[in-house]
Amino acid sequence: MPSVISPAVATKNVLVDLEPQEVLGFFEILANIPRGSGNEAGVADWVVRFAQGLGLDALRDELNCVLVRKPGQCGRENSEPLILHGHLDMVCEKAEGVEFDFVNDPIELMIDGDFVTARGTSLGADNGIGVSYILALLASTDVPHPPLEVVLTSMEELGKGGAAQFDTSVLSGRRMIDFNWISDTEILAGCSGDVTFTVDISADFERAPAANTAARLLTVRGLKGGHCEFDIQLERANALQVLARALNAVLDVAAVSVASPYGGAQNNAIPADAEAVLAFRPEDLEALETVIAGLSRDLQQEYGVADPDIRLELVAAPSREKVFSVSAARRLAAVLLLIPHGVISWNLRVPGRVETSNNLGTIRPTESGVQLMSTITSAVTSRKHEVFDRVRTLAGLAGAGVTVEMYGLDAPEFPYRPDSALLAVASDAYRFVMGAEPSVEVSQCSLELGMFSHRVPVADIISIGTELHALHFLRREI
């Protein structure tokens, strides 16, 4: 480990006995630097200082993307340059009941059998472990490599916002190895694209009726959640749409006021929790408890295989002075229910893979009401845009100022190229090192590969990685 790394950054050394230490040492350092999407300034500054400490050219841009250049070494000084890519940010998710501040607290690493995991939170191995391999290459003095152009993007997990504005004109390489894959037995040679959008819904705020003196927090809990691409076909419940079903149910049986809807961790994570405050007349409590208990039983039957721990609860809560108008609450529930979520079409060219899907990911309060955020993933750009048009049509039918806007990068797909020279080299290297045939993967996921192939343009790209499980959520299922 190079001396430029301050040992004070990683104080617990949980991974100190694991190999390869030249990689896992960096991973532990990254775990100690908060780096949720949109909060990458600290980790970007650290990478720049680290690289400059090695005598390398390094800089970061306004959105905390980092570019590092390293000359070739060990006889490869005059070779064609190679771009290495990863992303600095991570999805911030925590277990129910865990108190954790992702803006300030370091991830608490732990070893669970054969797995490195985190105590009560997401781990950040997506893409922390990939970035760690790249940092190890930057620090190496004996690994032969051509001139390197290292691009570490920000907000990859939030609409690919950093990559959308990164100045690709500064890159001279036309080959790229991405380090954002999830298996060390596969070489990723093609992937989907995606687009993220927001839906703004006005609350038409009003004061809660004077008779509504009782209040409860309606919660959706116990869901597995998951990655919006790798797990979307598993038919798990979407907490936001479950919340919408519950809101419709209670609005049908009593004069209920709705306030403070909130849910989901991030646009590209299947939402595992959601909540809203209900204000109502005390004499309606029994009817509300009955309808929520009935819906909860129905949900446990519906999701007994995919999400067996799903539950709805009403818990004590302070009342709210400002609530949604009845029509706005109905409109919110309708839009939440009708935005498509899950698999929309299967890929007939790559059997067994999802072609197009949508993940309705978050609901957040705004000054005028709420904003939803959702991500469409597709191997076919026109199909992706068709789903976006469906949502815009829905917004038009909902009326009352419901608006839909594209967010971040409209990321194109990266088509599979069987004749890729980089894929051939990587396959030969895998056979030499592992003594086995690699699996060449064409994935339903959306990475930033398509963006680089269109904007640089990079002519040849592959993605590699190490074994990851439970991306974007907490439970490990193997």
Image (cartoon, rainbow, N blue to C red):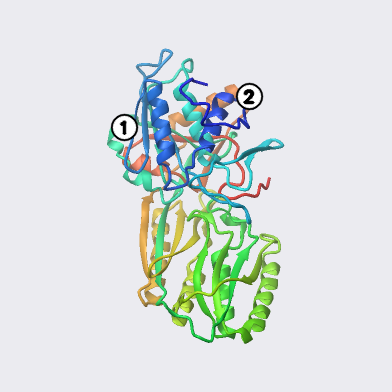
Q: Is residue 384 left or right of residue 299?
A: left
Q: Position of residue 180 (x, y in %)?
A: 50, 38
Q: Position of residue 263 (x, y in %)?
A: 53, 62
What secondary structure is found at the residue carrying circle 2?
loop
Q: Position of residue 5 (x, y in %)?
A: 48, 25
Residue under pointer 1: 171
Q: Residue at x 54, y 83 (%)?
A: 212
* Figure quadrant of residue 163: top left
* Figure quadrant of residue 309: bottom right
Give me the C-alpha separation between circle 1 and circle 2. Answer: 35 Å
Q: Residues within 10 Å of mark 1 (few under 14, many from 20)?
A: some
Residue 435 badge: 2
Which quarter shows the C terminus? top right
Q: Position of residue 295 (x, y in %)?
A: 65, 74
Q: Amino acid at mark 2?
A: Gly
Residue 339 vertical placement versus 67 (above, below)? below
Residue 416 vertical placement versus 230 (above, below)? above
Q: Amino acid at mark 1?
A: Leu
Residue 209 in sight in this render: yes
Q: Residue at x 37, y 56 (%)?
A: 407
